[in-house]
Image (cartoon, helix red, strand yellow):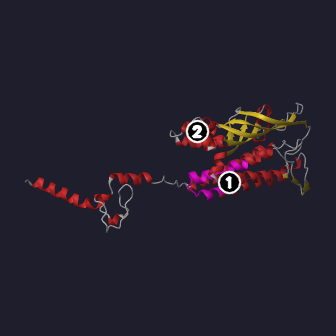
């Protein structure tokens, strides 16, 4: 027998001897527990190296969770920049051309040239017919949720910690806005209350996946003719006050009902939402000086609306994770214009010469 053949035989026998504790069934004295795949659960130090077969190694690699991102500094700076940018916009939109002594009206109490009170809630003769209150709730929610997801998904912070920080920052932002409004317009208790409701809703949805799966609070917006004229004539960038172009929707995802969504013919439910909607028309923006005042009316309705979030989740499933994340977030808070159908509604109208407020 040649030396090469001899070495080969010795190597095969050695490997067979090393494998024998693994391939042989456990003896009565063997205390190691074996799983259903026949692999011992003893520690690596108690098992020959050959136990780590390729299939075992691949299974361990596949079971590893995705790495958690760690961009804490970048995420924190980005969030700070977003708040700074919004604060700058509020100056140009709300305060730049407004003097503290030019307050249109104050229905509350004035102390030291500071107005406390508010402009009412959903009355027909209020400043924006109540749409402004839902606007405050929506804004509080999106800043709370936006801050949460930025800090958590990109920054790598703990989810609960991120949601608390996001909520506190959003509440502080709009509390500061109301403080400043008291000097230029009036401090509104109603505005602050709806800011807080929105923040709390955002906090709850960030920490309850099931609640988030079932509900969205969205705005459907298309610039009104009155706002477009103001933008052209005097460069008005206060798009937030274009309530005539806004519709607020509390949407219920039919796709959140698993028995319906997972049914053989239930895929359509991912794309359709039930919605309670509210809108006002004619309150804001104000008409131009050469125009007569508008007819003001409020509308509350129950209807159906397109769930664009569900559509894009479906289209990007397994294809583009970044695109799915972006569209999921955008259509969590925005509704595509002209995609809502009221089924039952009630309307209240009135002509108001000067609703007051700001």
Give the quadrant of the C terminus: top right
For residue 169, which quarter of the picture? bottom right
Give the quadrant of the N terminus: bottom left
Q: Position of residue 176 (x, y in %)?
A: 76, 55
Residue at left offset 70%, top offset 48%? 86
What residue did someone put label 1 on?
Answer: 204
- In the drawing, does residue 247 fall left or right of residue 129? left
* Magenta stretch holds residue 147: yes
**Mark 2 element type:** loop
Residue at left offset 76%, top offset 48%? 136
Circle on res. 263: 2
Residue at left offset 56%, top offset 51%? 154
Residue reaching furthest to the left: 1
Q: Nearer the viewer, residue 284 or 23?
A: 23
Q: Position of residue 108 (x, y in %)?
A: 90, 52
Residue 87 makes an appearance in the image: no
Circle on res. 286: none
The stretch in magenta equals 139-163
Estimate the spatial distance between the alpha carbons at disc 1 and disc 2, rounded to whole Å: 29 Å
Residue at left offset 56%, top offset 40%? 323
Q: Nearer the viewer, residue 93 or 284?
A: 284
- In the drawing, does residue 54 fall left or right of residue 79? left
**Mark 1 element type:** helix
Q: Position of residue 339 (x, y in %)?
A: 70, 33
Dot 1, how many residues are within 10 Å of its Cα: few (below 14), some (14-19), or many (20+)? some
Q: Main secondary structure of the magenta part?
A: helix
């Amino acid at each position: 027998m040649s030396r090469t053949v001899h070495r080969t035989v010795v190597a095969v026998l050695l490997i067979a001897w090393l494998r024998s504790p693994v391939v042989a069934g456990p003896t009565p004295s063997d205390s190691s527990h074996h799983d259903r795949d026949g692999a011992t659960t003893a520690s690596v130090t108690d098992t020959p190296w050959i136990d780590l077969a390729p299939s075992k190694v691949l299974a361990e690699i596949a079971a590893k969770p995705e790495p958690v991102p760690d961009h804490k500094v970048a995420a924190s700076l980005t969030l700070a920049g977003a708040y700074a940018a919004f604060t700058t916009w509020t100056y140009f939109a709300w305060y730049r051309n407004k003097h503290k002594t030019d307050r249109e009206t104050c229905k509350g109490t004035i102390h030291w040239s500071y107005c406390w009170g508010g402009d009412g809630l959903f009355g027909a003769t209020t400043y924006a017919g109540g749409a402004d209150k839902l606007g405050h709730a929506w804004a509080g929610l999106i800043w709370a949720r936006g801050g949460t997801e930025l800090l958590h998904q990109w920054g790598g912070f703990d989810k609960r910690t991120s949601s608390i920080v996001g909520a506190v920052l959003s509440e502080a932002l709009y509390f500061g806005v109301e403080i400043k409004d008291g000097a230029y317009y009036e401090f509104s208790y109603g505005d602050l209350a709806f800011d807080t409701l929105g923040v709390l809703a955002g906090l709850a949805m960030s920490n309850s996946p099931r609640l988030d799966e079932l509900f969205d609070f969205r705005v459907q917006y298309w610039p009104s003719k009155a706002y477009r004229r103001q933008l052209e004539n005097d460069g008005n960038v206060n798009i937030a006050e274009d309530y005539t172009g806004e519709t607020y929707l509390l949407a219920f995802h039919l796709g959140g009902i698993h028995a319906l969504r997972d049914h053989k013919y239930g895929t359509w439910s991912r794309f359709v939402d039930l919605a309670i909607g509210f809108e006002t028309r004619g309150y804001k923006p104000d008409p131009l000086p050469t125009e007569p005042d508008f007819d003001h009316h409020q509308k509350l309705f129950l209807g159906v609306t397109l769930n664009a979030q569900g559509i894009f989740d479906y289209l990007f499933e397994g294809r583009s994770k970044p695109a799915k994340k972006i569209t999921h977030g955008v259509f969590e808070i925005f509704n595509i214009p002209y995609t809502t159908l009221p089924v039952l509604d009630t309307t209240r109208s009135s002509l108001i010469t000067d609703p007051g407020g700001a």
